């Protein structure tokens, strides 16, 4: 059977539901925050702070599993390879689950949480929630493998619908059930995440059975999960760790402006990540669609078109009166305050980031499809090296606006990574 050409329209039809999936997942955190703010007789600021540090820790801990979908796409050439991918991802998830149990039941949790905050009340509130979160890695692993079957068969609409169902149940639980159950904020957040991911996983399992399954065996060689999967998981963990560096960079200013700089960075980052969600989806799409060298050109062309569109939307927000509606009316920032002043500059610098994200994750998908995952690890190590150099030598542009510092360095680091990935992708696969 001859596969249809990778036209921009065909790629758009498959990509759009995946982009929606990442957008909905990004939007689940504000829903949980809003639910926490409606808990009766609670210190909502303390609850939100505890949930924030819990979420920051779990994202780092879970980060190796966020690429389980790409690993399964590459290995699920036949059912034997799919089962091998599932065993590998579940084994990794079991290790991650044990780490979360240790975080919740031993002093390790307080020690790690102490790296995010020195408030003992926040640490004490956040730590028990790890004992609720520990099954989440197992669900993430299973979900990734079953969603891989859907993506390989262009069944991405149902992937998006699964995430929509997850979002709906998360909201229903957070707003209707949790306030009557007497949960604390971080416990509510942990249960919402668990319920949401479990729902999405069950949805993926049920739906995957309705799409055409790969043959039981095949002649194509399945890559070793240790040589292929582990470097990719490690690379993803490094990438998530780098995002924490930018938060730290945003706070490396004089004490009088630390709070306003971090607040401005957070305001900009929420918009940057929201518009970049479609770029993240391109990694799975590219991994599934890249089957021969000739596929590189249409995939990269599509990434440029999609990324330019997303960056144009962010530019519309950053450079027009819409900016004031978002920052002042929606985010409730004072127009004459430092947060607004710092965020305006950060938004302008963030405009190219959705385009960079789209190209970056497309190049990563091409390399994953070729089982060249060590290159991705090297690129992320390069980025971390640059961040460490900037932090060590204090090569900052401003002593006041940490958001400016963070986004200048972020642009340079991503551009360097794009150059490295582009050079490698342009060469013939070994």
Image: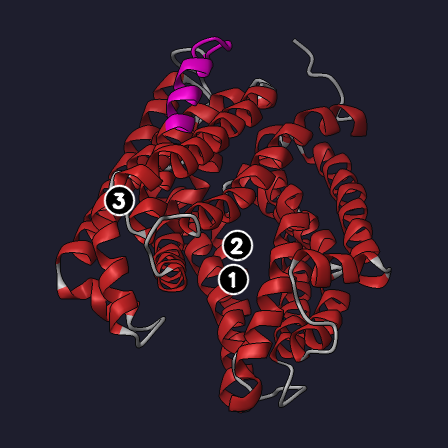
Q: What element carries label 1?
A: helix
Magenta stretch, residue numbers: 199-214
Secondary structure predominantly adopted by residues drawn in magenta: helix
Let me know if residue 207 is in the magenta part: yes
Rounded to the nearest angstrom, the CA distance separating label 3 from label 1 is 43 Å
**Relative height, residue 246 to residue 397 (above, below):** above
| Residue under pointer 3 | 182
**Could you tell which of marks 3 and 2 lies nearer the N-terminus?**
3
Mark 1 is surrounded, within 10 Å at the Cα level, by few (under 14), some (14 to 19) or many (20 or more) other residues, namely many
Question: Can you tell which mark lies on residue 376?
Answer: 2
Q: Residue sitting at 71 percent across and 38 percent down?
A: 296
Name the element at disc 3. loop
> Is residue 222 in sight in this rendering?
no
Disc 3, disc 2: CB below 8 Å? no
Place residue 288 in its image quadrant: top right
Q: In this view, does 330 lie to the left or right of 165?
A: right
Give the SS element for disc 2.
Answer: helix
Does the CB distance between marks 1 and 2 fall below 8 Å? yes
Crowd class of label 3 (few under 14; some 14 to 19; many from 20; radius 10 Å):
some
Quadrant showing the N terminus: top right
Name the residue beneath numbered marker 1.
Answer: 380
Between disc 3 and disc 1, the foreground one is 3
């Amino acid at each position: 059977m001859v596969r249809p050409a990778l036209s921009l329209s065909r790629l758009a039809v498959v990509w759009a539901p995946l982009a929606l999936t990442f957008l909905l997942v990004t939007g689940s955190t504000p829903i949980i925050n809003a639910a926490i703010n409606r808990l009766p007789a609670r210190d909502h600021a303390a609850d939100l702070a505890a949930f924030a540090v819990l979420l920051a820790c779990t994202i780092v801990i879970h980060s190796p599993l966020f690429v389980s979908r790409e690993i399964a796409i590459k290995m699920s050439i036949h059912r034997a390879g799919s089962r091998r991918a599932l065993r590998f991802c579940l084994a990794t998830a079991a290790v991650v689950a044990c780490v979360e149990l240790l975080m919740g039941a031993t002093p390790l949790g307080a020690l790690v949480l102490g790296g995010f905050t020195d408030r003992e009340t926040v640490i004490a509130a956040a730590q028990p929630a790890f004992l609720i979160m520990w099954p989440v890695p197992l669900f993430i692993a299973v979900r990734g493998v079953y969603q891989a079957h859907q993506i390989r068969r262009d069944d991405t609409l149902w992937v998006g619908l699964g995430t929509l169902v997850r979002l709906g149940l998360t909201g229903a639980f957070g707003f209707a059930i949790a306030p009557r159950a007497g949960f604390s904020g971080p416990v509510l957040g942990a249960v919402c995440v668990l319920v949401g991911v479990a729902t999405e996983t069950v949805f993926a399992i049920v739906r995957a059975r309705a799409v055409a399954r790969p043959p039981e065996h095949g002649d194509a060689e399945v890559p070793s999960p240790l040589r292929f999967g582990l470097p990719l998981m490690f690379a993803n963990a490094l990438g998530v760790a780098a995002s924490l560096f930018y938060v730290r960079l945003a706070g490396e200013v004089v004490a009088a402006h630390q709070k306003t700089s971090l607040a401005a960075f957070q305001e900009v980052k929420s918009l940057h990540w929201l518009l970049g969600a479609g770029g993240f989806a391109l990694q799975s799409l590219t991994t599934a669609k890249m089957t021969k060298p000739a596929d590189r050109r249409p995939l990269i062309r599509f990434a440029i078109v999609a990324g330019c569109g997303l960056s144009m939307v962010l530019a519309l927000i950053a450079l027009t009166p819409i900016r004031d509606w978002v920052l002042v009316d929606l985010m409730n920032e004072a127009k004459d305050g430092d947060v607004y002043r710092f965020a305006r500059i950060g938004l302008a610098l963030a405009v190219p980031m959705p385009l960079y994200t789209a190209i970056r994750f497309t190049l990563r998908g091409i390399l994953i499809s070729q089982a060249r995952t060590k290159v991705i690890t090297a690129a992320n190590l390069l980025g971390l090296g640059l961040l460490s150099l900037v932090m060590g030598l204090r090569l900052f542009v401003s002593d006041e606006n940490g958001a400016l510092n963070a986004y200048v360095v972020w642009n340079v680091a991503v551009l360097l990574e794009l150059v490295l990935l582009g050079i490698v992708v342009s060469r013939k696969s070994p």
